[in-house]
Image: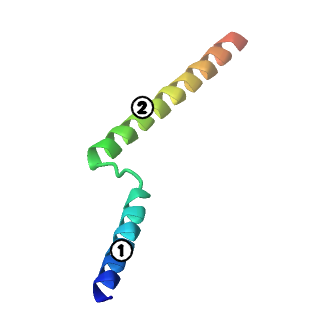
Amino acid sequence: MKRLLYILLFAFISTTALSLTSCREDKKDAGDKIEEAVDDTGDAIEEGAEEVEDEIDDATDDN
C-alpha cells in the first residue's frame, strides 16, 4: 500500500512539473533583446526621416 502511494505521488509530482514547465515562454537572451531593440530603433529612425523628407517636399512644393 505504501509503495502504491509513493508511485502515485511521484506520478502526480512529475505530471505537475511537466505541465508547468511546458507552458513557459521561450526566454530570449540579452543578445536577442539588444538586436531586437536596435532593429526597432532603426525602423523608427527610418520612419522619422521619411516623415521629415515628406514635410520638406510639401514645404518646397508650396513655394
In what element is the residue under mark 2?
helix
Q: Which amino acid lies under the numbered mark 1 shown in the image of this protein?
A: Ile
What is the x, y in percent for residue 41? 43, 37
| Vertical order, 15 against 28 (above or below) | below
Label 2 crowd (10 A; few <14 / some 14-19 / many >=20): few
**For this view, does 25 lie left or right of residue 1?**
right
**Marker disc for residue 13:** 1
Q: Which amino acid lies under the numbered mark 2 shown in the image of this protein?
A: Gly
In what element is the residue under mark 1?
helix
Residue carrying label 2: 42
Asked which quadrant contains residue 59, the reply is top right
**For this view, does 28 lie left or right of residue 56?**
left
What is the x, y in percent for residue 40? 44, 37
**For this view, does 14 lie left or right of residue 63?**
left
| Vertical order, 8 against 41 (above or below) | below
The tag earlier along the polypeptide, 1 or 2, is: 1
Q: Residue at x 41, y 53 (%)?
A: 25
Query: What whole-number distance in Å separates the C-alpha atoms at marks 1 and 2?
Result: 47 Å
39 vs 9, nearest the viewer: 9
What is the x, y in percent for residue 32? 32, 42
What is the x, y in percent for residue 62? 72, 13
Q: Residue at x 44, y 58 (%)?
A: 23
| Vertical order, 28 against 35 (above or below) | below
| Vertical order, 49 against 34 (above or below) | above
**For this view, does 1 lie left or right of residue 25?**
left
Asked which quadrant contains residue 63, the reply is top right
Give the residue furthest to the bottom.
2
Could you tell me which quadrant the N terminus lies in? bottom left
